[in-house]
Image (cartoon, rainbow, N blue to C red):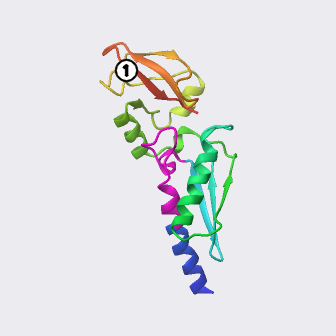
Amino acid sequence: MVTALLDDTALRQQAWDIAAGVVDPEIPVLTIADLGVLRDVAVTDGRVEVAITPTYSGCPAMNMIQLEIELALEREGFRGAKVRTVLSPAWTTDWMSEEGRRKLRDYGIAPPAAGSSRRALFGVQEVACPQCGSVNTEVLAEFGSTSCKALWRCKSCREPFDYFRCH
């Protein structure tokens, strides 16, 4: 019994590490762990179940993420892994890792500040330009190339940029 528990614990960590490496198909510099979409991995009697939460309900990337998790686990010997979608609690940008925020900025997308989802509910946003760092910015369009992003412009360097919207 203890051996089985240790085996499941080790398998859980291995499965977590594999699933955590799956990238977001819309922003391929981010993993699902960076985004906070990967919520849990459970192993029971050697069977793996992964729980993911979409950035918003109806996110078109979730089907691809589910398939990529299943394929990644299959490639590493985890047969028949299940991926389930968990809608509650709802995903928030507060679940993003600091590493994920850094990766977004380096990629040219302004990340939401940690803890900014509550302020965004009340329309209080300060978005720094990922090119020059200025907060003298303005929104051009509430939605950008994906529903997760808005189009902004820096008034200092005059460059347009995507902003990963707070949820």
Camera-side residue of 47 and 25: 25
Q: Position of residue 82 (x, y in %)?
A: 67, 61
Magenta includes 83?
no
Stretch of the chain drawn in magenta: 15-36
Q: Residue placed at 55% from the left, 33% from the top?
A: 117
Camera-side residue of 125 and 50: 50
The part of the image, by quadrant, that contains residue 107 is: top left
Is residue 36 shown above or below 27?
A: below
In what quadrant of the picture does the C terminus appear?
top right
Q: Is residue 115 left or right of residue 130?
A: right
Q: Position of residue 127 (x, y in %)?
A: 43, 24
Q: Position of residue 133 (x, y in %)?
A: 32, 25
The part of the image, by quadrant, that contains residue 84 is: bottom right
In what quadrant of the picture does the N terminus appear?
bottom right
Q: Position of residue 86 (x, y in %)?
A: 68, 50
Q: Residue placed at 54% from the left, 31% from the top?
A: 166
Q: Residue placed at 52% from the left, 26% from the top?
A: 145
Q: Is residue 63 left or right of residue 163?
A: right
Residue at image mark 1: 135
**Dot 1 amino acid type:** Val
Is residue 47 shown above or below 111?
A: below
Camera-side residue of 73 and 128: 73
Q: Dot 1: few (<14), some (14–19), or many (≥20) neighbours within 10 Å?
A: some
